[in-house]
Amino acid sequence: MKILLLVSAFNGLTQRAWCALRAAGHHVTVELAPTYRDPDSLTNAVAAIAPELILCPFLKHRVPEEVWRKWPTVVIHPGPVGDRGPSSLDYAIEDNEPMWGVTALSAVEEMDAGPIWGSRVFGMPTTPVSKAALYNGPVADAALELVNEVVAKAADPGFTPVPQDETPRPVPHACERPTMKQADRAFAWDHPAAHIVKKIRAADSSPGVRVNIEGRTVLVYDAAVGEQRSEQHRPGTIVGRGEDAIAVAAADRIVWIGHAKVPRNAGGNGIKLPAGMIFDVPVAEMPVPPAMREVDYRRHGDVGYFTVRAYNGAMSTRRCHRIADALETALAQDTKVLVFQGTPSTFSNGIHLNVIEAAASPAREAWDNIVAINRLCTALVSCTNQLTIAAVTANAGAGGVMLALAADVVVARNGVVLNPYYDMGLYGSELHTYTLPRRVGQATASRLLIDKLPVDAHAAAGLGLIDVAGPGDAVRFNEWVRQLATSYTDPQWYEGALAAKRQALEAVHPPAYFEAGELAEMAKDMFDDRSGFAAAREAFVHKATPQETPHRLAEHRWKLTGAR
């Protein structure tokens, strides 16, 4: 089937759908709706493609009537049947909904009002999660099931979508609600900490909640409840800091804030940054709560589990060095196996572009950042006393993928999407010229880096990019990883694998040789800006509207020209 993905951005869910549909043998092409300035130009583009089905897994823009009347157009909405509006997940978290859902419906004149192609429901987490974690977890899983269902129904000439008023509503009170405004998100620091954290998580990772901290107006993100508040601290004051987070007093407990942004209309640069970089105040260092720790290391017998938490997958210079300090300590233990893993919602996307863009010298900060993340990669690659396993728990991109490849064994959760290439006008480092060809061969490595296309976990396993794809459910995946790691403590596996690794490290060209070559290229990109790193970074950080759909995604174009 010829399928057009009409989307507002090629985000994680869109990438999952793209990978799955192509794997099923469909002809899939992409158009980014924001690149079209008027309905007629978009209609003409769709007409040139002549799709059999238009799927919209992530669409904030209105579909022109000339499009949805002529071609079957199905929108995946992150709410149950009857829910309408752009803030569905925000309300679901704010209102403590016990159950939520995802609906596939026809595009019509009125947003989210079309007849139903299918729906799914799921239980909401008992503890409020961030909107991003909810979207990338149960919402994305349900949405992918619906994508497959819609494609099957589109191929059935006898199928007709069901009007909404004739469709059962598993969430009876689901209804149309307006866009949630900052006034709806507002809280006061003398409110309970749990209430404040829920408010922030319902707005994370966008748009954040606008508040005042120590006389400064900021948008806050990435929050967790901390310890009991001391009576000597007035609500709203910063009482401590830890790692790059700040601790703010609330009515009953401490609220930890991991990230913040000073809006441009409040005199700031409008860049979301680690909160400790914005509020550089002289307060005591405090231990951050478990939910926000950058590193958690736990030992179970001969296996050490090293869990990294990188908000939105970004790893700044300071964070990389702190993680590397902990990793080097973990690798010096007398365990036989070390599992390097992310959280269910994040793994890594490499260097921290926001911190780089906000730096006094972006080029110098970018250089320091790549050197710092290379320290992590080198620690994994050069370890010869433990077998290392990278467990990719969530989507990963660029240097985050290459960081995983530095381990001896690489596994990923089913449903995870990898972007094993560099963009932003960067050559890339993270020892990828050593690890990537070693896994997939030079020809495939070059193709992955040049094509710049996403690869899901199953396809990655087929390429040899990872060793195997594990269960999609996060809890089952963790147990599966535990069993896998334990099996590698068997001397037959453990000793043979380490012997082979030592032999590889004694080759003519050691990893440091490859790093030196990569850094020489990166210096030209970062300091000389030979490939447009500065402009690409600025556009990414400030979420500039794309000017066109990348040629590599628009299959209908490169099939005509024969080149991507």
Image: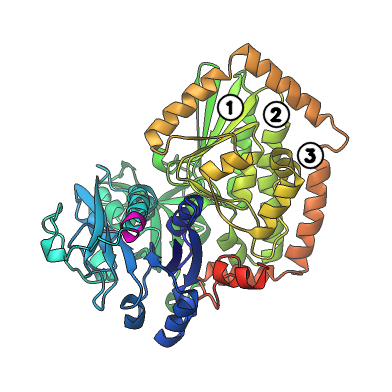
Q: Earlier in the sequence, mark 1 or mark 2?
A: 1
Q: Amino acid at mark 1?
A: Leu
Q: Which residue is mark 3?
A: 511
Magenta highlight range: 151-155
Quadrant including the C terminus: bottom right
| Residue 222 visible, this orientation | yes
Quadrant including the N terminus: bottom left
Q: Residue at x 45, y 79 (%)?
A: 47
Q: Is 458 or 295 nearer to us in this picture?
A: 458
Q: Residue furthest top?
A: 491
Q: Amino acid at mark 3?
A: Pro
Q: Which residue is mark 2?
A: 383
Q: Is residue 139 above or below residue 499?
A: below
- Which disc number belongs to residue 338? 1
Quick one: label 2, few (<14), some, or many (20+) residues within 10 Å?
some
For the residues marked 1 and 3, what is the alpha-carbon distance in whole angstroms? 20 Å
